[in-house]
Amino acid sequence: MRRYGKHTDEDDIRIRPDRRGSRPRTNIRPKHENAVEGMVLTVDRGRLTCLVDGRTVVAMKARELGRKAAVVGDRVALVGDLSGRKGTLARIVRIEERTSVLRRTADDDDPYERVVVANADQLAIVTALADPEPRPRLIDRCLVAAYDGGLDPLLVMTKSDLAPPDKLLELYGALDIPHVVVNREELEKGDAADRVRAHLEGRITAFVGHSGVGKTTLVNALVAEERRRETGRVNAVTGRGRHTTTSALALPLKGASGWVVDTPGVRSFGLAHVDPSRVIHAFPDLEPGTEGCPRACSHDEPDCALDEWVAEGHADPARLHSLRRLLASRERKEGD
């Protein structure tokens, strides 16, 4: 049905005014040249706490960023109210290029990868020597994620008063990973904290481990007292810890330059996002031997050139075994 007659004049047509005004749409976005740089310390329900010029500022993501999300460790550009006063809110208008990314998936079948921390230099993998028992499969997976993301690994073994570290040290000896062995009594005295702090100074270190290994207790020993977080206990029946850390948080290192990032305890560490070809970069003594490998070699098949490379004496056989164990961890659940 016609709304107007056959001989409609333009004066007969009524135009509904645009509520948003008459300004035409444009793809040109403001450059925000006066934006101030900050670092994301934590993210909580859409609100991001950032460090800007020595003070904390609460901000939200600007609409023009779309689906791009900022995570702990990100360097961001902010505009708006940067005073840090209670009730004020700034806007994050730009996320700077990342130097490293620690990522994980919920499991190996999950296509959705989660960025845990950005721009960290080091990944401290925290494992208890007992109560709960060590889980080498989970450690292997964290190592793969570190190598894939461009982070240097550090192995921190806690609760040495309950069990010796010899077996774990033997298992990872060929990888030449820096390690520290600590227990609660040493942390309370400060001796162990100093040993760990020596590996963290001047760096941004993400701490990861499953619940109950003493990760948050360790972090608390490394930061100022007013910044310490709640800790929990291991369940005597299940042997698992209770999640006390629910979101990642960056904290300044006490008595030295550097940052520690406490992350929530993990029960699994999916590696669906990892390209196996990138893991070999963490093995510079083996990488040249891959030149003779067939295309898309898994480095664990009959035609792999690494077997001949090691047989000729270019690298330690234990190193090749460690590489293959790490690559195989992508195909196995950590409880297998």
Image: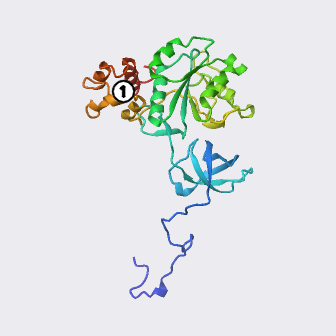
- Tell me residue 330's x, y (percent): 40, 28
Residue placed at 51% from the left, 31% from the top? 152
Q: Callout 1: 10 Å neighbours few (<14), some, many (20+)?
A: some
- Tell me residue 89's x, y (percent): 67, 53
Residue placed at 36% from the left, 18% from the top? 317
Do we see residue 232 in this rendering? no
Query: Which quadrant of the structure image shows residue 202?
Result: top right
Residue 244 falls left or right of residue 169: right
- Residue that badge 1 annotates: 286
Task: Note whether 185 is above or below 96 in the view shown.
Answer: above
Query: Which of the image's four quarters has the C terminus?
Result: top left
Disc 1 is placed on an element classified as loop
Residue placed at 48% from the left, 82% from the top? 13
Which amino acid lies under the numbered mark 1 shown in the image of this protein?
Leu
Viewer-side residue, 238 vs 106? 106
- Tell me residue 45's x, y (percent): 61, 44
Viewer-side residue, 277 vs 173? 173
- Tell me residue 11's x, y (percent): 49, 87
Query: Which quadrant of the structure image shows residue 275?
Result: top left
Residue 309 falls left or right of residue 78: left
Query: Which of the image's four quarters has the N terminus?
Result: bottom left
Q: How is the image coloured?
A: rainbow
Q: Residue furthest front?
A: 313
